[in-house]
Image (cartoon, rainbow, N blue to C red):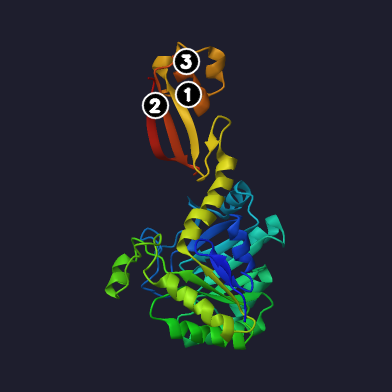
Amino acid sequence: MRKIFGTDNFGYVIGEPPMGCKLCYIGAKIVVFITGKCFDNCYYCPISLEKRGKDIMYVDEEKANRLADIIVEALRISARGAGITGGDPIAAFNRTIRVIEELKSYFGSNFHIHLYTTGRMLTKEWAKELERKGLDELRIHVTDELALKKTVTLARNLDIDVGVEIPAIPGKLEWIKHIITVLDENNVKFINLNELEVSTSNIIELKARGLKPSSRRFMAVEGSHELALSILKWAQENTNNINIHYCPVVYKDKYQLRLRLIRKALALAKHYEIVTDEGTILYAIIKSKDLERIDKEIIAIGESVGIGVKTYVDLAEGLLNKGLIREYNRVEEYPLLQRKILNILTVKGG
């Protein structure tokens, strides 16, 4: 019997996860949203309405207006790879090719790149072109028998890692077992099962099909987690070589995203700012009305702004405790190039 490793929050694996997932575990991959256009219209697609169907490009949480923006973001988080997604990257094939070329040229052949596509419009010639430009891993979102057969064909004809990535949709147990059986019999390397995600853009379509948000699991559909676990248990005795990886929604948000944000926050934080365990940036603002009571050398270690001085939280707290200031603002921000304020708390003396 094959062994299952993992936990409910971190996910489970039989065999080993794809290299792209291994790098995501440590927040070391940028996410390149190459376009919002797609050839399919999956009812469970979690992509925001601001992106869906629109030919726009993002890298992580930043809008990308040029290829150089992608390189800079990779440098900013000390990335070791990139995941190219959408929409469907094949809908912007030439742009996708250029991104792969630029990343490989700048960071070298060891910079790992995986690509996620429905595969509907992916021809053998285009797949070969992706391989020639340096793509390391191809993930196909199998929705029907045609996509399944195409995956098997591509896996036989490409010298890169080819696999499947699909959501664990309640009610699709036998279909997913069928996919895994066909992949395993044809020596396809891996399948990723994702817990079915609930978002503001798919909630209506999910409910229309009798699917509802879980009351226990973060932003997930009720029953998806249990379905994935039952598939893993079945696969223990009914598969031979295929690697099976299950990724819960909570892991992507609270671990993968958080670790990537921490890497970015460390790069963006100024000398007086603290990077929190959640990947946010923390600092204090001492208001102008209190500055005249503080030694100018203390003020100089901060940064002047319109309403006062930005400085260390610990310094502001110490000045407050000594009665040298009456209050300060404790500011928490999301680490974007154009900072996004999450919280402002006014801390007053006793």
**Which element type, helix, strand or loop, lies under badge 3?**
loop
Label 2 and label 1: CA atoms lie apart by: 9 Å
- Which residue is denoted by mark 2 in the rendering? 347
Residue at 50%, 59% in the rendered image: 252
Report crowding for label 1: few under 14, some 14 to 19, many 20 or more residues within 10 A (C-alpha).
some
Query: Which is nearer the N-term, disc 2 or disc 1?
Result: 1
Q: Dots 2 and 3: beta carbons under 8 Å? A: no
Residue at 39%, 20% in the rendered image: 349
Label 3 and label 1: CA atoms lie apart by: 9 Å
Total of numbered circles in the picture? Answer: 3
Q: Is residue 60 visible?
A: no
Q: Is residue 261 above or below residue 193?
A: above
Considering depth in this image, is 211 or 5 the residue closer to the camera? Answer: 5
Residue furthest out toward the right = 109
- Which residue is denoted by mark 1 in the rendering? 317
> Could you tell me residue 262's position as x and y percent?
56, 46
Three-letter code for the amino acid on which mark 3 is drawn: Lys
Q: Is residue 267 above or below residue 89?
A: above
Considering depth in this image, is 185 or 269 the residue closer to the camera? Answer: 185
